[in-house]
Amino acid sequence: MRNLPAEPGHEGSGGGGSAFADFISRLQPYPPPPGFQLALLYAAGGAVALLVAGIFGAALPTDLEGNGFHAIGASQVEPILGFFAAPSPAFVYLGFLALGVTAFVGMRRRMSETTGAILAALTMIGMAAFLWTAAGWAVWGLVTGANALLWLLVLSAIPIAVVLLLRGELFGAGVTLVIALVFATALQQAASDPATSSDSYAGPSQEAAAPPVTGPPPVSPAVEQREEEAERRQQQRQRKRQALVQQRIALEARMDAEFAGWREVPYVPPCGQQERRAELNSLRDIFARMKEALRYAARHVEAGVFRQAGSDLERMSRYRERAMANPAASYEESGFCPGGAGALRFIW
């Protein structure tokens, strides 16, 4: 309102202007909103409140049962205190984040609707976190105060018993002292750890009921002999398996050499290049099946498969020598092109 243009009728004291212009001249400006520095101060206070809430929330005692003091309400209040202490790490993290955001906004030195909303949100979050932690400590204070009052009532019976004793009332002093001791014992038992108390009571009975420790039962000679025989058979089986593995490696090397030798056998008419290629492919497939069977036999200790493979390779080697010497006679004898596949076709 202070930037409104001055009316001509109000320049002097004589008046003469309109009533509306006179009303406008008497309006007071609105109070200015909080400044930028004050908003930053509030946001920084909210960040500090978040840090304080996180630190005090982490320090909130959540293990009250069995600590020797809290005799009543400990088991019921522990989950509530744990619920209030759970977000304390998040409060610490948000506190450092809020400090960083406040410092960033302060360095920019620019006030807008967005930055104002951010600073206000940080202030509100900090206050909410502080109130959350304060509520948790308030619950702990109520429970602790109630237990402290109970202990004071029990302990105050001792001075009362002393006063009664000095006054000569022995019966009243004795009854008061006995009642105080009974209630103190009950409170101490209620405030002690239940696991420790149960162990202390169950320890002697468990030790008495525990069976005597005896050594392992004696092993008969027959059982020992059977175990030794089983171990010896296992060792023999392992040695046979290792020997078969060595034989398999040697037989696979012979197969590779035999395949290379069959590629050198001259094919004469009526065998041609196509028949030669078919024979070699068939021999390669047979050798692949032989190697797979030998690996299975080596794992399961089947020595007969290795003897059969060795004899088949020997017969194939002799047949290859005859085919290399006279391939035409080999064809007339067997009725097909000379090749190792013909020698092993009906075995593998």
Image (cartoon, grey):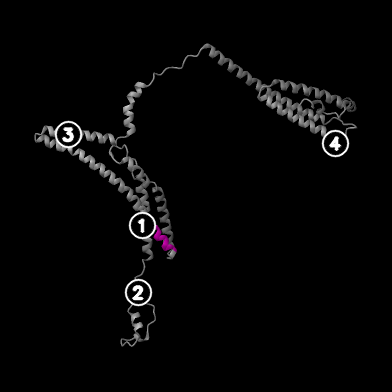
Above or below: residue 250 compared with residue 22: above
Q: Amino acid at mark 2?
A: Pro
Q: Amino acid at mark 1?
A: Gly
Is 95 left, or right, of 249 in this rendering? left
**Residue, disc 3:** 177
**Residue, disc 2:** 29
Q: Which residue is farthest left?
A: 168
Q: Secondary structure at mark 2?
A: loop
Camera-near label (3 vs 4) is 3
- Dot 3 or dot 1: first in sequence order is 1
Marks 4/2: CA–CA distance: 109 Å
Is 219 left, or right, of 241 in this rendering? left
Mark 2: give few (<14), some (14-19) or many (20+) Cα within 10 Å: few
Residue 18 part of the magenta-drawn span = no
Mark 3: give few (<14), some (14-19) or many (20+) Cα within 10 Å: many
> Quadrant location of residue 64?
top left
Is 136 left, or right, of 242 in this rendering? left
**Residue, disc 1:** 45
- Dot 1 or dot 2: first in sequence order is 2
**Residue, disc 4:** 274
Which stretch is magenta?
A: 114-122
Contact, mark 3 vs mark 1 (Cβ under 8 Å): no
